[in-house]
Amino acid sequence: MPEPSTFKKFVEVGRVVLVNQGPSEGKIAVIVEIIDHNRAIIDGPSTGVPRQPYAYRYVTLTPFVVPSLPRAAGSGVVKKYFDKSGIAEKWAASSWAKRREALQKRRALNDFERFEILLLKKQRRDTVRKSLKKSA
């Protein structure tokens, strides 16, 4: 009897992907149709990703799947299924999306804002040390 596979993220119709390159970088989309072993047609009508063929090497598979999405569904159908399954909310609540958002915020800071964060971290560290010393 074969062992059950521990691999969970397969390339399939309805799989939600994170676009890593191109004008839609950082947005999520849904695989609508599989072209071949290198490319699939993705569509993200709710997230602003236009319907287009995309190479797998430029997307990352997420653990989310739009359930029972028909193959080669049009943008209207994809939007309906995507919104009904609440994928955008699930993605926004995931630690992956939160980490990406925090990274983007950190990258957008200027020198003074980074300096302010440094001071706040020092302040927090000092209060933690003082409270630990008081309790010990």
Image (tube, rainbow, N blue to C red):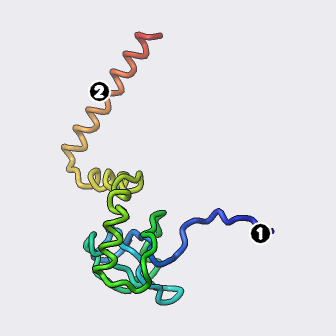
Report helix, strand or loop for mark 2: helix
| Residue 71, position as x, y percentages in the image | 44, 84
Q: Residue at x 28, y 37 (%)?
A: 118
Dot 1 alpha-carbon crowd within 10 angstroms: few under 14, some 14 to 19, many 20 or more: few
Q: Amino acid at mark 1?
A: Pro
- Residue 44 in the image: above or below residue 87: below
The furthest residue to the right: 1
Q: Quadrant of the N terminus?
A: bottom right
Write down the residue under mark 1.
2
Q: Amino acid at mark 2?
A: Gln
Most foreground residue, 111 or 14: 14
Quadrant in the picture for residue 55: bottom left
| Residue 41, position as x, y percentages in the image | 40, 84
Write down the residue under mark 2.
123
Quadrant in the picture for residue 9: bottom right
Report helix, strand or loop for mark 1: loop
Tell which circle, 2 or 1, labels the residue nearer the N-terminal end.
1
| Residue 32, position as x, y percentages in the image | 41, 81
